[in-house]
Image: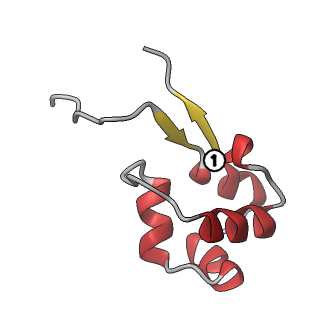
């Protein structure tokens, strides 16, 4: 299967952070006030953008920083 083209190098580590905390997307959604659909898009690296309010809410609930949540893929 061919790798899907992405127009950015940002990688989201939401799945790994949730796993480390034993938390589900549904629980994060409830606590952060962000829809499960939006969180799923982030978790699966399909997001093209993120609102600062969403980023703030997710980081606040997870006790992390944007630098913990995102890194740049090396080429």
Disc 1 designates what residue?
16
Question: x, y (%) of residue 36?
Answer: 49, 77
> Which residue extends farthest top?
75
Query: In this image, 7 relative to 59: left or right?
Result: left
Q: Is residue 27 above or below residue 71?
A: below
Query: In this image, 62 relative to 7: left or right?
Result: right
Q: Is residue 63 above or below residue 74?
A: below
Query: In this image, 68 relative to 13: left or right?
Result: right
* Front-most of residues 54 and 17: 54
Question: x, y (%) of residue 9?
Answer: 44, 30
> Which residue extends farthest left?
1
Q: Residues within 10 Å of mark 1 (few under 14, many from 20)?
A: few
Q: Residue at x 51, y 60 (%)?
A: 50
Q: Quadrant of the C terminus?
A: top left
* Front-most of residues 15 and 41: 41
Q: Quadrant of residue 29?
A: bottom right
> Which residue extends farthest right?
63
Query: In this image, 34 relative to 7: left or right?
Result: right
Question: x, y (%) of residue 55?
Answer: 64, 62
Q: Quadrant of residue 3?
A: top left
Q: Residue at x 23, y 33 (%)?
A: 5
Question: x, y (%) of residue 6?
Answer: 29, 36
* Front-most of residues 20 and 75: 75
Q: Residue at x 63, y 84 (%)?
A: 33
- In this rendering, the count of numbered labels is 1
Q: Quadrant of the N terminus?
A: top left
Q: Secondary structure at mark 1?
A: helix
Q: Residue at x 61, y 69 (%)?
A: 54
């Amino acid at each position: 299967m061919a790798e899907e083209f992405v127009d950015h190098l940002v990688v989201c580590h939401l799945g790994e952070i949730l796993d480390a905390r034993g938390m589900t997307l549904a629980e994060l959604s409830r606590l952060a006030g962000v829809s499960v659909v939006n969180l799923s898009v982030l978790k699966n690296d399909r997001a093209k953008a993120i609102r600062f309010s969403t980023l703030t809410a997710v980081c606040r609930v997870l006790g992390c920083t944007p630098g913990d949540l995102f890194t740049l893929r090396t080429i």
